């Protein structure tokens, strides 16, 4: 297929804080500043996390404090309806919303069924809201972790476990059929490497069955794993031979320390890249490969790394792929990476914010995990702080 030559996209200035924070009031900007100062201190995060866990365990009245600080920074609301103001606010600036039901740590079939019902409500909600093109979920949110581990290890399942595994398949089909009917995408998160083979099996099967003419099911590739670039290439080869659209969300990864520690403890080769440079290289190669095969690959660059965002823009231009091509998206977490999201949207690219939602108490595990992950990203919090401070100074002098 001959590529169309597009006009050069508007240059992206990721240091444009006026655009990045236009949606925030002065009060909200100040709240973000103090919160990121806290998160930028790993020791304070550790102490605050422990206190928060104890407070909720002892049913102390800390919900208002949590809600007006870290919850409001990273979550859109306690329900779909209460998330509407945030969705509308983002959409005003050309940024779409990717709904993420933030409840984690469930283990019972009853809880799993409740989660699936909530995800189905999210899909129905998105059907009638053009500002919500997709939802996101973790498969461990409706499948027992130990079961996924057993399937991944090719360990024979008991009769009860086989029934349980069949329920997981039914839930996957139920969600993907609903997404197809609503014409929205589902982003299935990557998880720990020792349950990822089961997740790959599930999501790849959904892509093969449902991704015809539209990317209804997305898999997620953690590029800090040294095998994921080859996985992408094999996925594309399978998609091409079987006639479906490969859909991938690219991230660097969230479980590096846990992965290396487990590999060392159990004595197997670490699945993690030797260093950050190797992860960055594979991440960019995956972006390039996806754009060069855009006829058969839908890709979402879900990174807070502005160099990777700029690189994808460059590769798109070089390959004649327009900024608003339906198979290319950028995504960042709500409450972070605004300098990337809003400046890309202003330049005409497809951008979405991950919007976790759910009751404050039930979303606490998600918020704790997010705070811990953020402290482990070298320079990320300092960058966020610096940009917020830059915008505060600009507003004072303007």
Image (tube, rainbow, N blue to C red):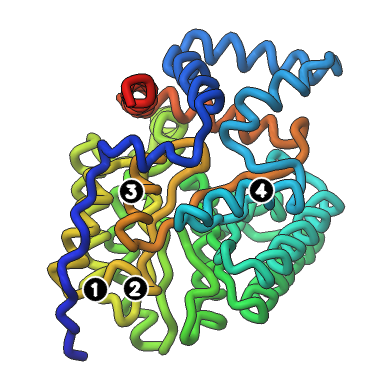
Residue annotated with mark 2: 325
Are dots 2 and 1 in contact, CB under 8 Å?
yes
Residue annotated with mark 3: 343
Residue 87 x/y as whole percent: 60, 52
Are dots 3 and 4 in contact, CB under 8 Å?
no
Q: Nearer the viewer, residue 204 or 321?
A: 321
Residue annotated with mark 1: 321
Q: Is residue 17 left or right of residue 90?
A: left
Viewer can see residue 372? no
Q: Residue at x 75, y 14 (%)?
A: 54
Disc 2 to disc 1, C-alpha distance: 7 Å
Disc 3 to disc 4, C-alpha distance: 21 Å
| Helix, strand or loop under label 3 | helix
Q: Quadrant of residue 14?
A: top left
N-terminal label among 2 and 3: 2
Residue 149 x/y as whole percent: 59, 50
Q: Quadrant of residue 209?
A: bottom right
Q: Residue at x 32, y 21 (%)?
A: 397
| Helix, strand or loop under label 4 | helix
Q: Which quarter of the rendering shows the C terminus? A: top left
Q: Residue at x 69, y 75 (%)?
A: 178
10 Å neighbourhood of mark 2: few (<14), some, or many (≥20)?
A: some
Residue 265 x/y as whole percent: 45, 28
Q: Quadrant of residue 393?
A: top left
Q: Which quarter of the rendering shows the N terminus? A: bottom left
| Helix, strand or loop under label 2 | loop
N-terminal label among 2 and 4: 4
Residue annotated with mark 4: 85
Residue 91 x/y as whole percent: 53, 56
């Amino acid at each position: 297929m001959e590529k169309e030559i597009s006009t050069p996209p508007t240059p992206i200035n990721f240091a444009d804080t006026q655009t990045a924070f236009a949606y925030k009031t002065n009060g909200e900007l100040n709240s973000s500043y103090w919160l990121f100062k806290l998160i930028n201190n790993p020791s304070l995060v550790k102490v605050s996390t422990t206190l928060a866990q104890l407070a909720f365990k002892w049913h102390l009245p800390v919900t208002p404090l949590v809600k007006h600080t870290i919850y409001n920074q990273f979550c859109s609301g306690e329900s779909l309806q209460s998330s509407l103001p945030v969705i509308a606010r983002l959409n005003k600036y050309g940024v779409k919303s990717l709904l993420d039901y933030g409840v984690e740590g469930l283990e019972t079939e009853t809880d799993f069924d409740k989660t699936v019902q909530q995800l189905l409500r999210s899909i129905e909600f998105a059907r009638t809201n053009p500002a919500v093109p997709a939802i996101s979920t973790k498969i461990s949110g409706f499948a027992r972790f130990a079961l996924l581990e057993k399937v991944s290890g090719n360990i024979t399942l008991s009769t009860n476990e086989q029934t349980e595994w069949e329920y997981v398949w039914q839930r996957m089909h139920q969600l993907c059929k609903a997404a197809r009917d609503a014409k929205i995408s589902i982003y299935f998160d990557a998880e720990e490497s020792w349950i990822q083979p089961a997740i790959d099996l599930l999501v790849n099967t959904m892509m093969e069955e449902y991704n015809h003419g539209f990317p209804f099911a997305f898999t997620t590739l953690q590029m800090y794993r040294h095998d994921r670039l080859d996985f992408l290439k094999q996925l594309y080869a399978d998609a091409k031979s079987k006639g479906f659209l490969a859909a991938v969300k690219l991230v660097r990864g969230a479980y590096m320390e846990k992965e290396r520690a487990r590999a060392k403890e159990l004595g197997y080769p670490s699945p993690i890249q030797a260093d950050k440079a190797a992860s960055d290289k594979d991440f960019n190669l995956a972006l390039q490969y996806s754009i060069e095969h855009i006829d058969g690959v839908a890709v979402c660059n879900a990174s807070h790394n502005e160099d990777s965002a700029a690189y994808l823009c460059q590769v798109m231009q070089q390959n004649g792929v327009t900024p608003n091509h339906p198979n290319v998206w950028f995504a960042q977490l709500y409450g972070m990476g605004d300098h990337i999201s809003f400046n890309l949207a202003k330049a005409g690219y497809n951008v979405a914010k991950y919007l976790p939602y759910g009751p404050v108490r039930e979303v606490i595990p998600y918020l704790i995990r997010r705070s811990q992950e953020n402290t482990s990203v070298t320079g990320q919090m300092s960058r966020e702080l610096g940009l917020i401070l830059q915008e505060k100074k600009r507003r004072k002098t303007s």
